[in-house]
Image (cartoon, rainbow, N blue to C red):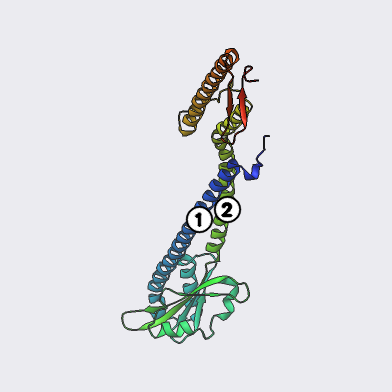
Amino acid sequence: MERKVGFFKSIQFKLIIIYVLLILIAMQIMGVYFTRQLEDQLVENHFNMLDERADLLAYSLVEPLTAQWDDRAELTAEVNTLLRDLFSIENSEVQVIDANRVVIGTSNLSNQNIIGQLSSEIPVRRALIGNRDGPGSIYRDPQTGNRIRVLAVPIRDEEAIVGALYIEASIEDIYDQMQDINSILASGTLIAASITALLMILLSRTITGPILDMRKQALRMGYGDFSRKVNVHSTDEIGQLAMSFNDLTMKLKDALSTRDQEQKKLRSVLTHMTDGVIASDKHGKMILMNKRAE
């Protein structure tokens, strides 16, 4: 009796699952490595760009901060002009502080009220004594939750420190871009897995098709039907197995035909013998007897 194998227990399903899992694992490993490297590179590029702009601005502010101004408003106007020209970085704010910790300019138009006030930021105090904040500190804004880089840069002339720059630059856009890239990678992984599953369905049929054909032929052979041959579609291992199966079928057919002929000959000889002949198996049971023996 022929037993049907369920799809979820078949070789075809196992091949599909294996290849889809391999694709998913490979895509995940590549995705994690790629996004990590890209994120580090984007953050590093942003830091380098911020440092270069800060150094350029600090160099350009030496002359205004060391000049003599009759009206402090003129100094503020000059500083704000330099900020607009040299530090137009989106989602960032830079403050210019003189040697007395007084804010004399800011790039944030909505925060102009801090001009003339004392800066209480600790990085500013460190910058005014000549210390620059390494690669910059990152913290989260308690109100928006955005990641912000803080940088304080001393402004030096040839003799002394004449001021400092205090910079707050949001780097949340970088992480937003990384989320978009992760979404694209996730979509690409799903598309690749779907295409792989479809291709594996087609490919697995070329493997399981001949096997199923041989199974049907084996069942036919069990009922004595040796007339059908397994179709050979390739010359690979599966094709060679099909050819070997066909060769075995022909040999088995010839062997059974020879056995039938020998049995007919033996039956004819026993029928025409004048002596009685009785044959038994090893247990003594009679398995053959001619007419004379009867």
**Residue 56 % position (x, y):** 39, 69
Compare residues 286 and 69 and report the one nearer the observer.
286
Can I make out residue 107 in this image?
A: no
**Residue 17 % position (x, y):** 58, 47
| Label 1 element class | helix
Compare residues 289 and 43 and report the one nearer the observer.
289
Asked if 222 appears above or below 98 in the picture, the reply is above
At label 2, counting other C-alpha atoms closer than 10 Å, the crowd grade (few under 14, some 14-19, many 20 or more) is some
- Give the residue at mark 1: 31
Q: Which mark is residue 57?
A: none
Asked if 248 appears above or below 42 in the picture, the reply is above
**Residue 278 % position (x, y):** 59, 24
Compare residues 70 and 188 and report the one nearer the observer.
188
Total numbered labels: 2
User: Which quadrant: the C terminus?
Assistant: top right
Q: Quadrant of residue 275?
A: top right
Asked if 221 appears above or below 90 in the picture, the reply is above
- Whether label 2 touches label 1, CB < 8 Å: yes
User: Which quadrant: the N terminus?
Assistant: top right
The amino acid marked with disc number 2 is Ala
Can I make out residue 161 in this image?
A: yes
Q: Residue at x 59, y 19 (%)?
A: 276
Q: Quadrant of residue 37?
A: bottom left
Alpha carbon distance from label 2 to label 1: 9 Å
Query: Reading the chain from its start, which is encountered first: label 2 or label 1?
Result: 1
**Residue 87 % position (x, y):** 47, 67
Q: Quadrant of residue 147?
A: bottom right
Q: Residue at x 46, y 69 (%)?
A: 82
Drawn side of residue 102 relative to residue 264, left or right: left
The amino acid marked with disc number 1 is Gly
- Give the residue at mark 2: 186
